[in-house]
Amino acid sequence: MSNTSIRIGQLCVASLLVLVSSCGKPPAQASAGPPIKAVATLEEVMHGMVIPSAQTVWGASGTIYTAKGVEERMPKSEDEWILVEASAVTLTEAGNLLMMEGRAKDTGRWMDRARALREAGAEVHKAAKAKNVAALFEKGGNLFDACQGCHFDYRYEKDPKVIRSH
Ligand code: HEC
């Protein structure tokens, strides 16, 4: 036998041993199930993540007319911009969370509505990173449309008396 075939033979024995020894052990996390799991309810995601983040975004731009005059709203410090960015990230990822089994109401239109939130959130994020107040206002409007789109399909029909604020 040549040196090479001895080595190949040794290799085969070694890999057989690995196979045999791994057969004896239960596969890692066999009973853990899928790694991700929806824990918070849909309402909790709305109240804990979506609503406060959207309020931060909407509060960061626009024009307010008061008795004292006209106020053009915009983030006034680095920290305020960072807060808008973080809120946009939360909204973007909330779109993904809404798609998870246990929260998604179906696998068709619901997914499109959740994707619209994710995309609107990502656009707001871009505007905030660029510190572009006009874009922040415009993309904030698209965000509102994304909320409304899903609510018209899945929220108001459940309770037609609900105040259609957002
Ligand atoms: C993919 C669907 C979807 C998207 C997108 C969505 N929502 Fe909702 N939202 C719902 C549903 C469904 C309910 C009703 C939950 C329930 O009552 O079980 C709801 C409820 C709410 C409520 C009422 C909560 C309550 O206590 O009654 C508010 C406020 C709200 N959403 C705000 C928003 C805002 C703001 C956005 C966008 C930034 C948004 N939602 C995006 C599906 C969505």
Image (cartoon, grey):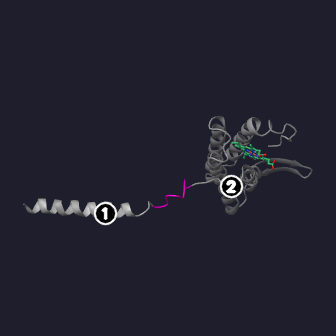
Look at 13% across and 62% down and name the residue there: 6
- Mark 2: amino acid: Ser
Residue 79 figure quarter: bottom right
Residue 71: x and y in percent read 82, 51
> Considering the image in quadrants, where does the N terminus appear?
bottom left
Residue 34: x and y in percent read 54, 53
> Considering the image in quadrants, where does the C terminus appear?
top right
Residue 55: x and y in percent read 76, 52
Residue nearest the observer in this picture, 144 or 8: 8
Q: Earlier in the sequence, mark 1 or mark 2?
A: 1
Specify few, some or many for label 1: CA neighbours under 10 Å numbering under 14, 14-19, or 20 or more.
few
Number of marks drawn: 2
Residue nearest the observer in this picture, 12 or 104: 12
| In the image, residue 59 above or below residue 120 | below
Q: Is residue 31 magenta?
A: yes
Q: Which residues are magenta?
A: 28-35
Residue 120 figure quarter: top right
Residue underneath mark 1: 18
- Mark 1: amino acid: Val
Residue underneath mark 2: 87
- Magenta stretch: helix, strand or loop mostly: loop
Residue 21 shown left or right of residue 114 in the figure:
left
Specify few, some or many for label 2: CA neighbours under 10 Å numbering under 14, 14-19, or 20 or more.
many
Look at 67% across and 44% down and name the residue there: 135
Residue 15 shown left or right of residue 159 in the figure:
left
Residue nearest the observer in this picture, 135 or 120: 120
Q: Secondary structure at mark 1?
A: helix
